[in-house]
């Protein structure tokens, strides 16, 4: 059994970075990963402009201004946002200016309106500003030709705003990895089927498809595969023909009907991992197939028990998909220190994950254990949780009030 950290490192080493690039529209690039560097086509700001409502003046005209000895300037024009100034600001003059408006020639400083008094076409300045106060200079944020965004960046709201501001209408992104999802087991049925004795609903197909989307990949649900070697072989071959990554659940333990590892070997796959020292989720198969003109497809055989399937996905599959999607950094799961409100018990032989709710408080993070049983088959009390407390190998008890490392798996 590989320790969790060693297994994660091995999996990330096996997972290649993407190399292909595709162009998508600005309107459809949300959530995608930038594939090429974006140089700025423009200066930001595009021109000198005002950061405040007030008056554009020459600094030398307003030095020494105070409420007792105001400086009196003549108003020449009003400059609304989006309109070019028409007049030069000369000695003893001022132009009314609004936030974002272009700075007129001759002016070098903005006096905010709160420290002025207006008398017809005269402006009384009642306070001395700092030189160049509230002037946003052309190119002070970014100059044309500078790097605007680097590859490997996930495109969210701020990134969309930057791309739109740069008039980047076609965005180079990495293709989203395609992930085939298989559920194995004669006992499995779809949610719309009437349950017979001994049968269970295939919840893994739905949970894994959702987690694949959250990891920035495209799920390809291929349904339920019976515990028959020929059917499993055909399903894996079909998945290989259409996916970059294959995720199956069930069939990787040591039972009489666990055929996954055997079929993978028959298909020429190299099995790199057979089990990991975590609970729940000990049975985990990770394999690669021979590359045929591209990257070798990566196969994840997850345990069939629903909690084990989700835990191993969060811990091992999601980091690999984040790397395969092209993200430059932050592939691995996020762990934060938290104070546990409950005693956390474990067997000590494997790294044990206990699910619950992580909350932020003024004193830091707190972790509350979900009620009910914590075993690999109890999916029910996972609802509403967002984190897994990690009890390390060799530890059987973390008392309430102690600090525990917590893996964030939801919002």
Image (cartoon, rainbow, N blue to C red):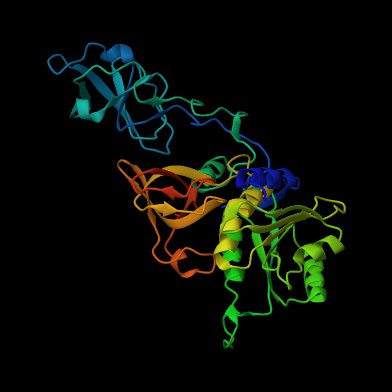
Q: Position of residue 311 (x, y in %)?
A: 56, 58
67, above or below 80, in the image? above
Q: Who is closer to the viewer here, 341 or 290? A: 341
Residue at the spot 34% in from the left edge and 51% down from the top edge: 341
Q: Who is closer to the viewer here, 17 or 79? A: 17
Q: Position of residue 274 (x, y in %)?
A: 72, 55
Q: Who is closer to the viewer here, 28 or 359? A: 359
Q: From the viewer's perspective, is 222 left or right of 208?
A: right
Residue at the spot 31% in from the left edge and 11% down from the top edge: 60
Q: Who is closer to the viewer here, 289 or 350? A: 350
Q: Is residue 173 visible?
A: no
Q: Position of residue 18 (x, y in %)?
A: 73, 46
153, above or below 293, in the image? above
Q: Is residue 229 visible?
A: yes
85, above or below 411, in the image? above
Residue at the spot 52% in from the left edge and 50% down from the top edge: 348
* Count of marks overlaid on the render: 0
> Quarter holding the C terminus?
bottom left
Q: From the viewer's perspective, is 11 left or right of 146?
A: right
Q: From the viewer's perspective, is 386 left or right of 39?
A: left
75, above or below 351, in the image? above
Quarter-wise, where is residue 309 in the image? bottom right
Quarter-wise, where is residue 62 in the image? top left
Q: Position of residue 376 (x, y in %)?
A: 54, 65
């Amino acid at each position: 059994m590989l320790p969790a950290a060693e297994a994660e490192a091995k999996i990330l080493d096996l997972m290649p970075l993407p190399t292909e690039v595709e162009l998508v529209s600005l309107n459809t690039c949300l959530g995608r990963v930038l594939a090429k560097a974006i140089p700025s086509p423009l200066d930001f700001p595009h021109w000198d402009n005002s950061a405040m409502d007030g008056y554009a003046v020459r600094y030398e005209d307003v030095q020494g201004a105070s409420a007792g000895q105001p400086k009196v300037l003549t108003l020449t024009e009003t400059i609304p946002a989006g309109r070019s100034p028409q007049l030069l600001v000369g000695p003893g003059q001022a132009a009314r200016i609004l936030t974002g408006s272009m700075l007129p020639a001759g002016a070098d400083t903005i006096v905010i309106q709160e420290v002025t008094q207006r008398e017809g076409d005269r402006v009384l300045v009642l306070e001395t500003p700092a030189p160049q106060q509230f002037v946003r200079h052309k190119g002070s944020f970014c100059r044309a030709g500078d790097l605007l965004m680097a590859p490997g960046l996930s495109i969210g709201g701020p990134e969309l705003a930057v791309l739109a501001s740069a008039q980047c209408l076609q965005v180079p992104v990495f293709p989203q990895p395609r992930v085939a999802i298989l559920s194995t087991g004669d006992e499995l049925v779809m949610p719309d089927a009437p349950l017979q004795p001994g049968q269970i609903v295939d919840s893994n197909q739905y949970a894994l498809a959702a987690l694949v989307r959250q990891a920035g990949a495209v799920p390809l649900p291929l349904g339920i595969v019976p515990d028959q070697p020929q059917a499993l072989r055909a399903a894996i071959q079909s998945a290989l023909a259409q996916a970059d990554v294959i995720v199956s659940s069930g069939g990787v333990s040591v039972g009489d009907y666990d055929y996954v590892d055997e079929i993978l070997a028959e298909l020429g796959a190299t099995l790199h991992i057979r089990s990991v020292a975590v609970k729940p989720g000990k049975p985990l198969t990770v394999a690669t197939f021979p590359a045929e003109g591209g990257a070798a497809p990566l196969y994840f055989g997850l345990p069939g028990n629903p909690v084990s399937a989700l835990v191993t996905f969060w811990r091992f599959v999601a980091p690999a998909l984040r790397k395969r999607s092209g993200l430059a950094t932050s592939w691995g799961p996020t762990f934060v220190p938290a104070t546990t409100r409950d005693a956390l018990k474990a067997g000590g032989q494997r790294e044990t994950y206990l699910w619950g709710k992580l909350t932020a408080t003024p004193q830091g993070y707190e972790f509350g254990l979900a009620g009910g049983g914590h075993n690999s088959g109890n999916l029910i009390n996972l609802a509403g949780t967002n984190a897994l407390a990690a009890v390390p190998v060799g530890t059987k008890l973390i008392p309430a009030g102690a600090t525990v490392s917590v893996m964030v798996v939801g919002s």
